[in-house]
Image (spheres, helix red, strand yellow):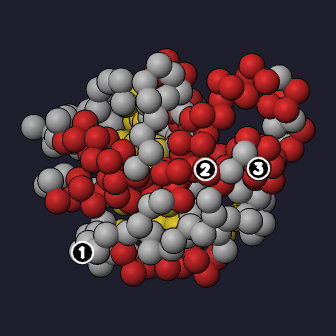
Amino acid sequence: MDKAITGTDWLRVLRADPAPRHQLVCFPPGGGSASAYRELARRFDSGVTVVGVQYPGRQDRLGEPAVTDLHDLAERIAAELLRQAPVAGLSIFGHSMGATVAYETAVRLEQGGQRLGALFVSGRPAPTFDEPGRLHLGPDDALIDQLALLADDPASVAVLREEPSLAELVLPTVRADYQAVETYRHHSAAPLTCGIDALISTEDPTAAPEQAAGWRAHTTGEFRLHTFSGGHFYLDEQSGAVAKVIGETLR
């Protein structure tokens, strides 16, 4: 019998529902954690359970080594979800690095017999895009510069220069995530059968609308492209609008 997702080390229930019609698993961006989606989870109406993925190497999993291979990360997450299968009304969402991990997880879930309602990918080119950067091999200052470029408020990143002890705590996981993204290469796979909704913002320096449109090739189902104003982390300011897009697709 289909059932609701239960919390584990990998899966954190951010919004529970006693009788969910839809269950949305959210994959954080690089450097992020499951709690990044608390505000998005709050925006949904009844009937939707929202779960955040907790990658190793952050928050209460800080003592575990971060995973530096996106294929390996997706294998582990898919295995965790398949252990709970069949999951009722399952769809998945990922932003930035999380979009690629969500896609790779979706491939493995469909191969494992788990039906998906939809895949939502945000702020990331289609998986055939090879990231040209090699920030993971560079100095800490270059990583901090990149974080400042992407942040809605660059001043919020300045603390990493002012507090070396904080940088020592945060930057190893950020570097590991950049390594995972920059070394990722897409492996040939059959298109997903679930629909894909691609979400992109107008001022994102990491992905353009035409790159987001490339996700169309990775599904035999419906494809929709949604554009929002803002930068790379537009979701922080537009969680309500994003939840509305997701909710309309789920319905």
Q: Residue drawn at (60%, 34%), measured in percent from left and top?
A: 172
Q: Position of residue 2 (x, y in %)?
A: 16, 39
Q: Which secondary structure lies at badge 2?
A: helix
Q: Which secondary structure lies at badge 3?
A: helix
Q: Which mark is residue 190?
A: 1
Q: Earlier in the sequence, mark 3 or mark 2?
A: 2
Indicate the quadrant containing the N terminus: top left, top right, bottom left or bottom right. Answer: top left
Q: Is residue 83 left or right of residue 103?
A: left
The residue that mark 3 highlights is: 142
Q: Is residue 69 left or right of residue 133?
A: left
Labels 3 and 1 touching (C-beta < 8 A): no
Q: Position of residue 83 (x, y in %)?
A: 17, 35
* Mark 3 vs mark 1: in front: 3
The quarter holding residue 13 reads top left
Q: Position of residue 209 (x, y in %)?
A: 64, 76
Q: Earlier in the sequence, mark 2 or mark 1?
A: 2
Towards the viewer: 177 or 49: 177
Q: Position of residue 164 (x, y in %)?
A: 79, 24
Towards the viewer: 74 or 223: 74
Q: Residue drawn at (39%, 81%), measured in percent from left and top?
A: 217
Q: Earlier in the sequence, mark 3 or mark 1?
A: 3
Towards the viewer: 245 or 219: 219
